[in-house]
Image (cartoon, rainbow, N blue to C red):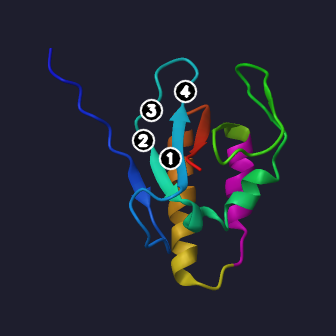
Amino acid sequence: MGKKKAETIRTMKYRYSGPKNGIGYSFSPIRYDEAAANNRIFIYDEDFSDMLPFIQKKYPLADIRTGEIYAAFDPCWDNPIPKAVWEQVIQELDALSVEDPGQLAFIHSFTAWVREVLEQADEIVIYGNL
């Protein structure tokens, strides 16, 4: 048997220019009936700060698989967010009026990734590394 190749996580950047191991979030698409998809991304906290409130206001959320209630977004732990909630978030992000073309391109890149992975995923879990 050959060694399994380690998955590399793509980093999406907008403004962040700090150290490579900075505070941020990993986004992992999950399918309930099989192993997780390998299309994960990482976004630094500074770059995600404008989009995070759109997710935070969806709380409290229930984990579809366990029924566990998450009272608030946790920047230190995992945050399972179901597909239906992501669909609301990307609609809200699409409706944003943003002056900065770089920021607009970054938001569009993120929402395009979310749409792409939701074609195969049931949820996207955000893991904070704070």
Query: Which percent across, then down, holds residue 56?
Result: 77, 52
User: Which comes before the other along the chain, label 3 or label 1?
Assistant: 3
The local secondary structure at tag 1 comes to helix
Residue named by callout 4:
31
Q: CA distance from mark 3 to mark 1?
A: 12 Å
Q: Is residue 95 magenta?
A: yes
Question: Which numbered disc, 1 or 2, marks the residue closer to the eye?
Answer: 2
- The amino acid on which the numbered mark 2 sits, given as a three-letter code, is Asn
User: Which comes before the other along the chain, label 1 or label 4?
Assistant: 4
Q: Which mark is residue 106?
A: none
Q: Marks 2 and 3: CB-CB under 8 Å?
A: yes
User: Which comes before the other along the chain, label 1 or label 2?
Assistant: 2
Q: CA distance from mark 1 to mark 4?
A: 13 Å
User: Which comes before the other along the chain, label 4 or label 3?
Assistant: 4
**Who's the residue at 79% across and 21% down the image?**
67
- The amino acid on which the numbered mark 3 sits, given as a three-letter code, is Ala
Residue named by callout 3:
37
- The amino acid on which the numbered mark 1 sits, given as a three-letter code, is Glu
Q: CA distance from mark 2 to mark 4?
A: 12 Å
Q: If the image is split into quadrants, where does the N terminus sit? A: top left
Residue named by callout 2:
39
Does residue 108 appear to the left or right of 76 in the view shown? left
Question: Which numbered disc, 1 or 4, marks the residue closer to the eye?
Answer: 4
- The amino acid on which the numbered mark 4 sits, given as a three-letter code, is Arg
Residue named by callout 1:
116
- The residue positioned farthest toward the top in the image shown: 1
